[in-house]
Amino acid sequence: MDHFVTELLEASGLTAVALAARSGVSRSTLFRIDQGQTDSRIETLREVAIAAGFDLAVATRPLSDPDAGRAARVLLDGRYDFQPGQSVRQWINRLGRLAENDPVDIVRVAGVSSSLLKRTGAVFLTGEADDLKLAAAGENSGRAWILSGRGALEQISDSEQPLPGVPRILYADDVHRVVRSLDHLVQGRPERADVIVAPWTDDLSIDALVAGRLRYVAPIQALIDGFGLGGSAADVAADVAGSW
């Protein structure tokens, strides 16, 4: 709910003084709500929204929060040079509760909670494309890109066998341009995807694994993504994480 109050003020044209008076919520509390510094009750947030001429709708949606993965890396990856914000700090606390501070379980819970199969903005493709083709699509976009999924798990797994059935992942700064360049692939359902093209974020490049022309996410991010994919990808991630 960060900047909830600011958005209401901009939309309504009210001042903070007027909003406080109309809602019965003090200006100091409004400030803390806006900065994410307090856990306000739904009833309080609705009063603030109504005072600004709006209503508050609360709905559930599939969980895919990349901050869960970031929190796991802050906890477990000494090379992850990342300054956590409020949301990541909240996930650090959640992972401690949900995974009981077990490192493998932290990665598993973070993976399930940040699963790309439920990620807004991700595109799911079916058809054949190896990591070299995906890397070429990333390069041709002229924007940042990095690989994960099948190829990344094969890089960090002790097994020399390929991992059929595990989707390949391309994080890209220009998802739509990359998808257009992979026009031999067909968009489909998440659970049947051979390739997932997901939105890029800058922290994905931290501690990247370079293999010739290919760039893969850090090993722990590969495990997080593997757990998020489920099935055989999660089995490989569990084997690798358990051996560390």
Image (tube, rainbow, N blue to C red):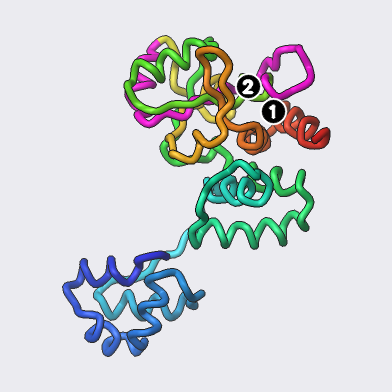
Report if residue 94 lies within the magenta region: no
Q: Give the amino acid type for the residue marked by disc 1 in the picture.
A: Ala
Distance, label 1 to label 2, CA atoms, is 8 Å
Residue 105 is situated, as x and y percent measured from the top left of the image, at 76, 47
Residue 10 in the image: above or below residue 38: above
123 or 220: nearer the viewer: 220
Residue 116 is situated, as x and y percent measured from the top left of the image, at 54, 36
Horizontal side of residue 164 vs 70, given as left or right: right
Q: Which residue is mark 2?
A: 150
Q: Quadrant of the N terminus?
A: bottom left
Q: Which residue is mark 1?
A: 233
Residue farthest toward the right in the current orientation of the protein: 243
State yes or no: discs 1 and 2 in contact (Cβ < 8 Å).
yes
Q: Which residues are magenta?
A: 155-183
The residue at 44%/17% (across/down) is 186
Tag 1's secondary structure?
helix
Q: Give the amino acid type for the residue marked by disc 2 in the picture.
A: Arg
